[in-house]
C-alpha cells in the first residue's frame, strides 16, 4: 500500500506564479536506487551522531562537547546556517533534506579527520542560537564534573 504524500507546500510556493518555477528540463532526476541512497545516508547520520562522534570525544578530551545531541546540534546548525529547528521539523534524522544531511555528515567526518575545527563549529552554532560562548576552560570543567558524576555511579552516561 502506498503511503500518502505528506509534504505541505509553503505559503510562498502557493503565492508565486507558475511561470517563475523551474522548467522540468532543468531538473536532474536520479531514480536509480534513490530509496537505497536515502536509507544509507540517514543510517550514516545516525551512526555518526549517536556512536562515532561521542566515541571519538572520549579519545579527544579537548573537544567542547561529548554528548550525541550536542554533535547533532553543531552539525545541523552549521549545515543549515541557522538554528536547525527553525527550518527542519524533528526528528532530524528523518526530516532533514538529503543534501543538508550529507553536508552535516561531511562536517562530522571532517571533525573526525581533523580537517574541521569542532571549536569553530560549536562557537558558530552557539552564536546562531544567541547563546554565550563557553570557551575551553568551561568545557573542561564540565567534562571533569561529568567524569566525577559517572565514576560515582559506576556507569558511563552520554
Image (cartoon, rainbow, N blue to C red):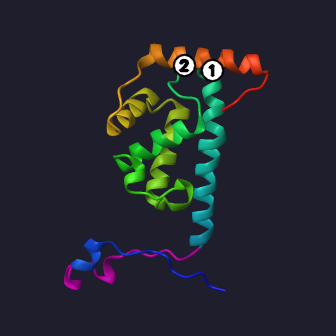
Task: Please tell me whether the stretch drawn in magenta is mainly helix, strand or loop.
Answer: loop
Q: Secondary structure at mark 1?
A: helix
**Residue at image point 46% right, 30% down:** 118
Mark 2 element type: helix
User: In 3D space, how far apart are the residues under numbered discs 1 and 2 (Cα atoms)?
Assistant: 6 Å
Q: Nearer the viewer, residue 85 or 38?
A: 85
Residue range (magenta)? 16-32
Q: Position of residue 72 (x, y in %)?
A: 52, 43
Residue at image position (61%, 44%) is 48
Q: Quadrant of the N terminus?
A: bottom right
Q: Quadrant of residue 148?
A: top right
In this rendering, the answer to whether 95 lies above or below 21 is: above
- Specify the quadrant that holds the C terminus: top right
On the image, the x and y values in percent for residue 84 come to 41, 49
In the rendered image, the vertical position of residue 70 relative to residue 29, given as above or below: above
The residue indicated by pointer 1 is 146
Which residue is at a point 20% across and 84% down the rendered structure image? 19
Instruction: Tell me the residue that label 2 is attached to.
Output: 142
Quick one: label 1, few (<14), some, or many (20+) residues within 10 Å?
A: some
Residue 106 horizontal side relative to residue 143, left or right: left
User: In the image, residue 20 lies at what x, y percent?
Assistant: 20, 79
Tell me the tag on residue 86.
Answer: none
* Contact (Cβ within 8 Å) of mark 1 with mark 2: yes
Instruction: Find out whether residue 59 is within the magenta segment.
Output: no
Q: Is residue 61 above or below residue 18?
A: above
- The answer to whether residue 21 is magenta is yes
Amino acid at each position: 500500500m502506498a503511503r500518502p504524500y505528506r509534504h505541505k507546500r509553503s505559503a510562498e510556493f502557493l503565492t508565486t506564479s507558475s511561470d517563475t518555477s523551474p522548467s522540468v528540463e532543468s531538473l536532474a532526476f536520479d531514480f536509480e536506487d534513490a530509496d537505497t541512497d536515502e536509507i544509507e545516508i540517514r543510517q550514516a547520520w545516525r551512526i555518526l551522531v549517536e556512536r562515532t562522534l561521542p566515541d571519538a570525544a572520549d579519545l579527544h578530551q579537548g573537544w567542547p562537547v561529548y554528548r550525541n545531541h550536542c554533535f547533532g546540534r553543531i552539525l545541523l546548525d552549521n549545515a543549515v546556517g541557522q538554528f536547525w529547528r527553525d527550518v527542519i521539523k524533528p526528528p532530524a534524522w528523518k526530516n532533514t533534506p538529503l543534501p543538508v544531511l550529507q553536508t552535516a555528515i561531511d562536517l562530522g567526518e571532517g571533525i573526525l579527520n581533523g580537517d574541521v575545527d569542532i571549536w569553530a563549529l560549536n562557537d558558530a552554532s552557539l552564536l546562531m542560537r544567541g547563546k554565550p560562548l563557553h570557551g575551553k576552560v568551561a568545557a573542561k570543567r564540565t567534562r571533569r564534573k561529568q567524569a566525577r558524576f559517572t565514576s560515582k555511579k559506576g556507569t558511563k552516561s552520554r
